[in-house]
Image (cartoon, grey):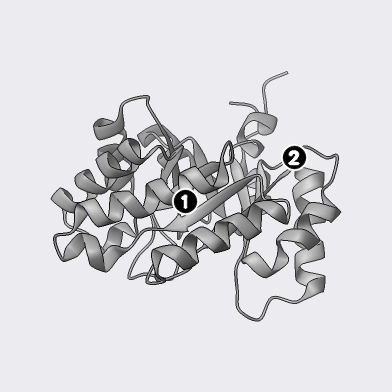
C-alpha cells in the first residue's frame, strides 16, 4: 500500500465538544494537504467544511445522532437531511443501541432505512458502538444495516467504553463479505493500529491522528 492509498482510506476526525473554528479550519487544511478521504465533524461544522473543501475532492462526513444514538428516528432523519443540504458527502449515524439491546431489531432497521432513504445517494455509515454489544448483537447489527441499505458499518464513536478492535472488524467482515464498507474508528493512533484494522477487513479508518500515522509509514521502495 502506498502513502496515497492509505491517506485515501482515512477520515480525518475532529468531534470534540470544544473544537473551535480554528481547529476545524486546521482539520480541513490538513485533510487537503494529506489527501485524506474526508473530514468527520459534528453537524454544526458541515457547511463550514463544505465551503473550505469545495473543489478539493475531500469529503465532509458529519455525525448524526452522535454520540449516544438515543435521538428519536425523526430527529435523526431531519439531522441527516439538513447535513446533506449543508454539503455532507457521507453521514455517520449512531444506531439506536438501546433498542437493539432491548430486542427491537425491526425498529433499528426501520430507523436506519429511513435515514438512508432521506439522504438519497449520500452514503450512510452506521455506527454500532461495538463495545456495548454481544457477539450476537454485533452480527445482528451488521445484517440489519445491510438490509436497511447502509453503505458502511462503523465500529465506534470514540466516546464508548472502548474503540475499534481487530476482532470486531474481522467479525463484521465475516458477516458482510464484500457487500459493505467497514469503518474502524476509536483508539486508532499508530500506523500499526491502522494496518491491523485494514488487514482485518476495514476499508476506512476514522482517526484524529492521521498525520502521525502517515509519518510512521515505512518509506516506499524506489
Q: Choose between 117 and 165: the one closer to the eye.
A: 117
Q: Position of residue 23 (x, y in %)?
A: 76, 70
Foreground residue, 152 or 187?
152
Q: Quadrant of residue 174?
A: top left
x, y percent for residue 137: 18, 52
Nearer-N-terminus badge (1/2) = 2
Residue assigned mark 1? 115
Which of the two residues, 76 or 222, is positioned nearer the viewer here? 76
Q: Is residue 75 left or right of residue 113?
A: right
User: Where 70 falls versus 77 (above or below)?
Assistant: below
Q: How many marks?
A: 2
Can residue 192 be seen by looking at this rendering? no
- Residue 75 lies, with reference to residue 54, above or below; the image says below
The quadrant in which the N terminus is found is top right
Q: Which residue is at a point 32% across and 63% down the rendered structure image?
A: 96
The residue identified by callout 2 is 35
Task: Between residue 185 and residue 84, name the one nearer to us.
Answer: 84
Circle 2 SS class: loop
Name the front one of labels 1 and 2: 1
Look at 32% across and 50% down and name the residue there: 110
Say which residue appears at 82% left-offset and 45% top-offset.
33
Amino acid at each position: 500500500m502506498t502513502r496515497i492509498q492509505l491517506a485515501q482510506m482515512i477520515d480525518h476526525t475532529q468531534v470534540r465538544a470544544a473544537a473551535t473554528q480554528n481547529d476545524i479550519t486546521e482539520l480541513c487544511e490538513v485533510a487537503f494537504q494529506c489527501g485524506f478521504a474526508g473530514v468527520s465533524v459534528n453537524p454544526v461544522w458541515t457547511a463550514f467544511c463544505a465551503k473550505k473543501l469545495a473543489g478539493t475532492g475531500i469529503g465532509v462526513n458529519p455525525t448524526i445522532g452522535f454520540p449516544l444514538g438515543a435521538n428519536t428516528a425523526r430527529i435523526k432523519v431531519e439531522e441527516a437531511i439538513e447535513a446533506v443540504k449543508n454539503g455532507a458527502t457521507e453521514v455517520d449515524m449512531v444506531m439506536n443501541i438501546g433498542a437493539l439491546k432491548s430486542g427491537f431489531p425491526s425498529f433499528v432497521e426501520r430507523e436506519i432505512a429511513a435515514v438512508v432513504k432521506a439522504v438519497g445517494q449520500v452514503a450512510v455509515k452506521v455506527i454500532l458502538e461495538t463495545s456495548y454489544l454481544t457477539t450476537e448483537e454485533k452480527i445482528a447489527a451488521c445484517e440489519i444495516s445491510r438490509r436497511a441499505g447502509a453503505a458502511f458499518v462503523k465500529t465506534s464513536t470514540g466516546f464508548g467504553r472502548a474503540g475499534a478492535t481487530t476482532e470486531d472488524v474481522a467479525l463484521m467482515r465475516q458477516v458482510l463479505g464484500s457487500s459493505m464498507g467497514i469503518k474502524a474508528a476509536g483508539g486508532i493512533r499508530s500506523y500499526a493500529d491502522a494496518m491491523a484494522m485494514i488487514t482485518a477487513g476495514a476499508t476506512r479508518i476514522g482517526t484524529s491522528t492521521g498525520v502521525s500515522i502517515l509519518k510512521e509509514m515505512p518509506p516506499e521502495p524506489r
